[in-house]
């Protein structure tokens, strides 16, 4: 299983930011992992032309609807048409600020697959839930509710993002990361069967060039979902380089 390092630009980036993707393309040597960059939807088409297939692009969300009177929404087919190959779903910021439920995330995943996109489905607990020792049950519920039965290693990856670590500079201990990833693997196998054993589980939450090597090479960690550190090619390249060849 090749690891996946995915960059989530969130609500950052305008046309001038394409220079970072071009720098990434020009400096990208033979890597030991798969790479994905998810810029804002406004940049996907231009990014697709700028990088000329050097690495895949993804969206940060999509509608569960295929088309219609849904002002402001973007369908999975639109992302695909713009040049995306994947989409992030159920990110904690979507769940927190837009009230997205597990059921809504699951419906979006089905729509993404139907349009030919692979999905990265995010799960993770808040600081209060971690302090109350509820992280296992919270993440189990999110896996059960957010990941449809049609999920496979080919169409889905899971991103474990402890909400309290996103953008804070805080990260769980190595042991806590390994334990949660093993727990998620168990939840996936319970829900989806043996096929889930090949599904990649990424770690996300303040991944940066300083901690990438120790996190990316932990047992059970199949890659990373990187936020702010993916905005600059130089930083993202250091994270990519931290993946050790198998």
Image (cartoon, grey):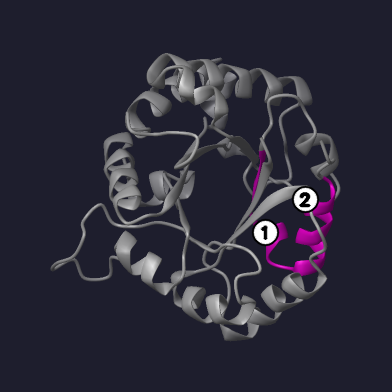
Residue 215 located left or right of residue 92:
right
Q: Residue 98 location, x and y as percent?
A: 34, 51
Q: Quadrant location of the N terminus?
A: top right
Q: Does 242 sit above or below residue 186? A: below
**Crowd around label 1: few <14 · some 14–19 · many ≥20 (10 Å):** some
Quarter holding residue 66:
bottom left
- Chief secondary structure of the magenta portion: helix
Asked whether the residues under the numbered discs 1 and 2 touch, taking CB atoms below 8 Å apart as contact, a structural biologist would say yes
**Lower position in the chain sequence, tag 1 or tag 2:** 2
Q: Does 28 sit above or below residue 110? A: below
Quarter holding residue 174:
top right
Q: Residue 12 location, x and y as percent?
A: 57, 70
Residue 208 is tagged as 2
Is 231 contained in the magenta span?
yes
Name which residue lies at 47% across and 59% down: 85
Magenta-highlighted residues:
223-242
Residue 228 is tagged as 1
Q: Residue 206 location, x and y as percent?
A: 70, 46
Name which residue lies at 58% across and 63% down: 9
Q: Secondary structure at mark 2?
A: loop
Residue at the far left in the pictured view: 69
Q: Does 179 sit above or below residue 34? A: above
Between 113 and 240, the residue placed more toward the observer is 113
Residue 35 located left or right of residue 145:
right
Name which residue lies at 33% across and 69% down: 78
């Amino acid at each position: 299983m090749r690891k996946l390092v995915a960059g989530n630009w969130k609500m950052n980036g305008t046309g001038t930011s394409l220079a970072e993707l071009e720098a990434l393309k020009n400096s990208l040597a033979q890597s030991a992992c798969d790479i994905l960059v998810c810029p804002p939807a406004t940049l996907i088409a231009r990014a697709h032309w700028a990088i000329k297939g050097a690495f895949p692009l993804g969206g940060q969300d999509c509608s569960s609807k295929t088309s219609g009177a849904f002002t402001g929404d973007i369908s999975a087919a639109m992302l695909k048409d713009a040049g995306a190959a994947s989409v992030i779903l159920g990110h904690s910021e979507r769940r927190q600020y837009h009230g997205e439920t597990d059921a809504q995330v699951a419906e979006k995943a089905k729509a993404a697959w139907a349009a030919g996109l692979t999905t990265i489905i995010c799960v993770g607990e808040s600081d209060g839930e971690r302090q109350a020792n509820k992280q296992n049950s919270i993440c189990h519920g999110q896996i059960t509710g957010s990941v449809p039965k049609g999920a496979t290693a080919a169409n889905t990856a899971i991103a474990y993002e402890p909400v309290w670590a996103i953008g804070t500079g805080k990260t769980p201990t190595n042991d806590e990361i390994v334990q949660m990833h093993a727990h998620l693997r168990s939840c996936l196998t319970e829900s989806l069967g043996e096929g889930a054993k090949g599904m990649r589980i990424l770690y996300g939450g303040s991944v940066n060039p300083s901690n990438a090597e120790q996190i990316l090479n932990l047992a059970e960690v199949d890659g990373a979902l990187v936020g702010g550190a993916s905005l600059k090619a130089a930083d993202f390249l250091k994270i990519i380089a931290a993946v050790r060849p198998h």
